[in-house]
Image: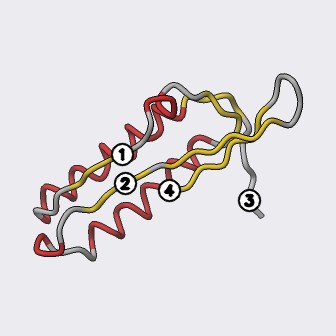
């Protein structure tokens, strides 16, 4: 059983927190960590479980860093967003990480 919270949160804050978590391991392993996301993503407010999202994204990023060598090149944390209107005031946003 998993209980998810649904709160309004700033996606940019979550992405910065995830990147910050990855920077520590990135320095230790001497693997360059890059990030790439549109500026609109940083100011996006979403409804959902921000802590769970941060936890999942950080786990993926830390695994990528853990199993990468500096000779493999940088690890890129990239976000691609797509919006689809479902009415006059509401949009569904798909995010690829």
From mark 4 to mark 2, how far is it between C-alphas?
7 Å
- Decide: few, some or many residues near mark 4? Use Cα within 10 Å; few <14, some 14-19, many ≥20: few
Q: Nearer the viewer, mark 3 or mark 2?
A: 2
Q: Which type of secondary structure does the marked residue at label 1 adopt?
A: strand
In the displayed structure image, the side of residue 75 where residue 7 appears, left or right: right
Q: Are marks 1 and 2 in contact (CB under 8 Å)?
A: yes
Image quarter for residue 36?
top left
- Residue that numbered label 1 is attached to: 36
Alpha carbon separation for disc pair 4 and 1: 10 Å
Marks 4,2: beta carbons within 8 A: yes
Numbered tag placed on residue 97 in the rendering:
4
Sooner in the amino-acid sequence: mark 1 or mark 2? 1
* Secondary structure at numbered mark 3: loop
Q: Position of residue 37 (x, y in %)?
A: 42, 42
Distance from disc 1 to disc 2, alpha carbons, whole Å, reads 6 Å
- For the N terminus, the quadrant is bottom right
Q: Separation of disc 3 and disc 4 at Cα?
A: 22 Å
**Mark 3, residue position:** 2
Label 1 vs label 2, nearer the camera:
1
Question: Which one is in front in this view, the residue at disc 3 or the one at disc 1?
Answer: 1
Question: Residue 79 — which label?
Answer: none
Would you say 90 lies left or right of 31 here? right
Name the residue that disc number 2 marks: 77
Secondary-structure class at tag 2: strand
Q: Which-is-in-front pick, marks 3 and 4?
A: 4
Dots 3, 4 in contact, CB < 8 A: no
Quadrant in the picture for residue 48: top right
Which residue corresponds to the image point at 23% horizontal and 74% vertical from the top-left? 68
- Spatial CA span between label 3 and label 2: 27 Å
Tag 1 or tag 4, which sits nearer the N-term?
1
Residue 14: give x, y in percent of width and height. Answer: 47, 38
Please give the name of the residue rendered at 57% of the width and 45% of the height, measured from the top-left corner.
Answer: 81
């Amino acid at each position: 059983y998993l209980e998810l919270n649904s709160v309004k949160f700033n996606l940019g804050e979550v992405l910065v927190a995830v990147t910050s978590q990855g920077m520590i391991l990135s320095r230790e392993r001497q693997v360059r960590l890059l990030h790439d996301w549109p500026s609109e993503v940083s100011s996006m407010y979403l409804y959902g479980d921000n802590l769970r999202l941060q936890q999942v994204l950080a786990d993926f990023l830390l695994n990528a860093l853990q199993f990468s060598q500096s000779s493999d090149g940088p690890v890129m944390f990239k976000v691609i967003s797509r919006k689809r209107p479902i009415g006059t005031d509401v949009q569904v946003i798909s995010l690829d990480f």
